[in-house]
Image (cartoon, grey):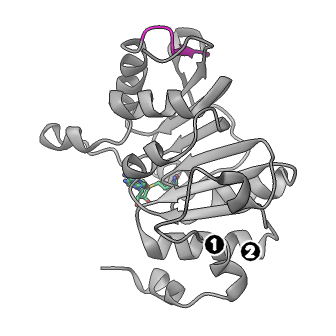
Amino acid sequence: MASPALRRYRRISAAAAALILPADADLGALDALFGRRAPRRLELGCGHGEFIAALAAAHPEEDCLGIELDPLRVNKAAHKCAAAGAQHVRLLAAAAEAVLPRLPPAAFHRIYALFPDPWPKRAHRRRRLLNRATLLALARLAVPGCRLIVSSDCHEYALQVLTNATTLPGLWRPLLPNGYALDLPVRFVTVFERHKRAEGARIMHVHLERSAVPLP
Ligand SMILES: C[S@@+](CC[C@H](N)C(=O)[O-])C[C@H]1O[C@@H](n2cnc3c(N)ncnc32)[C@H](O)[C@@H]1O
C-alpha cells in the first residue's frame, strides 16, 4: 500500500502528466517521443525522481528516460521533473525487464541503476534486476563508450553485477580500479543513498563501459 506521502501524487498537473509515456508508447521511436534527436540517458528504477530531475536540469541539451515500476513514484518523479523545468524527460511506469527489448539499439550513452532493490535473502536473489540477461539487454541499448553506473549499499549485489558483466565477454569493461569503489562523491544524491548514508552504510559503486564488441 502506498504511503500517505506518495498518495498525494495520485493527482498531478498537466505539465507533469505530459512527461509520462503511455504503457503502449512506441519506444522504438524515441525521437518522436522526445520531439527531437539528442544524446540520451536512461535510469532504471528512478524512484521518486530526485536524480533524474537533477540530471535533466543539468543537461538540457540531452534527453533522459526513466523507468520505474511503481506508478505513484512515476507521478512523483514527473512532478519533480516538471518543477525543475525539465521538458526533455520521459517516464514510464513499467518493469524495466519488459521495457528494455522495446527500446532501439545503441540509444543511450549513460545508463544508471542507483540502489536497485537488493533482495538480500538468498531465496529472493533471482528477483534482482541487474542479472546477466539485463546486462545483455543493456549492452544492446548502449553506444560504444556508454557508461553503466551502479550504486548499492548491498555490496554483495554490486559485486554480483561486476561478476555478471565479466560473463558477457568483452561487452562491458570495468572502469574503476579493482572493479569497484566505496563512497565515491556523487553529483546528485538519491533518496535511498541519503537514507543509507544516514544509517551509516557504505556505498559501493560499479562503473562499467560498453566496448565496441558486437553482441554475441
Ligand atoms: C531501492 S529503490 C531506489 C530508488 C532510487 N533509484 C533511489 O536511489 O532513490 C528501487 C526502485 O526500483 C524500482 N524497481 C524495482 N524493480 C524494478 C523493475 N523491475 N523495473 C523498474 N523499476 C523497478 C522500485 O519500485 C524502486 O522505486
Residue 186: x %, y % from top left? 69, 40
Neighbourhood count class around disc 2 (C-alpha, 10 Å): few under 14, some 14–19, many 20 upward: many
Q: In the rendered image, which quarter is residue 137 located in?
A: top left
CA gap, disc 1 and disc 2: 6 Å
**26 up-or-down from 178: above or below:** below
- The residue pinned by badge 2 equals 82
Neighbourhood count class around disc 1 (C-alpha, 10 Å): few under 14, some 14–19, many 20 upward: many
Position of 193 with respect to 137 (left or right) is right
- The residue pinned by badge 1 equals 78
Residue 181 visible in the current orientation: yes
**188 up-or-down from 10: above or below:** above
Q: Nearer the viewer, residue 120 or 105?
A: 105
Q: Look at the numbered disc 2 and say if its residue's Cβ is closer than 8 Å to ligand 1.
A: no
What's the residue type where badge 1 is placed?
Ala
Q: Secondary structure at mark 1?
A: helix
Who's the residue at 51% across and 15% down the image? 171
Image quadrant, ligand 1: bottom left
Query: Residue 172 in magenta?
Result: yes
Q: In the rendered image, which quarter is residue 104 located in?
A: top right
Position of 76 with respect to 135 (left or right) is right
Who's the residue at 78% across and 41% down the image? 39
**35 up-or-down from 168: above or below:** below
Who's the residue at 66% across and 56% down the image? 52
Residue 20: x %, y % from top left? 59, 71
What's the residue type where badge 2 is placed?
Ala
Mark 1 touches mark 2? (CB < 8 Å): yes
Who's the residue at 26% across and 45% down the image? 119
Query: Residue 53 in magenta?
Result: no
User: Magenta residues, as a range?
Assistant: 169-175
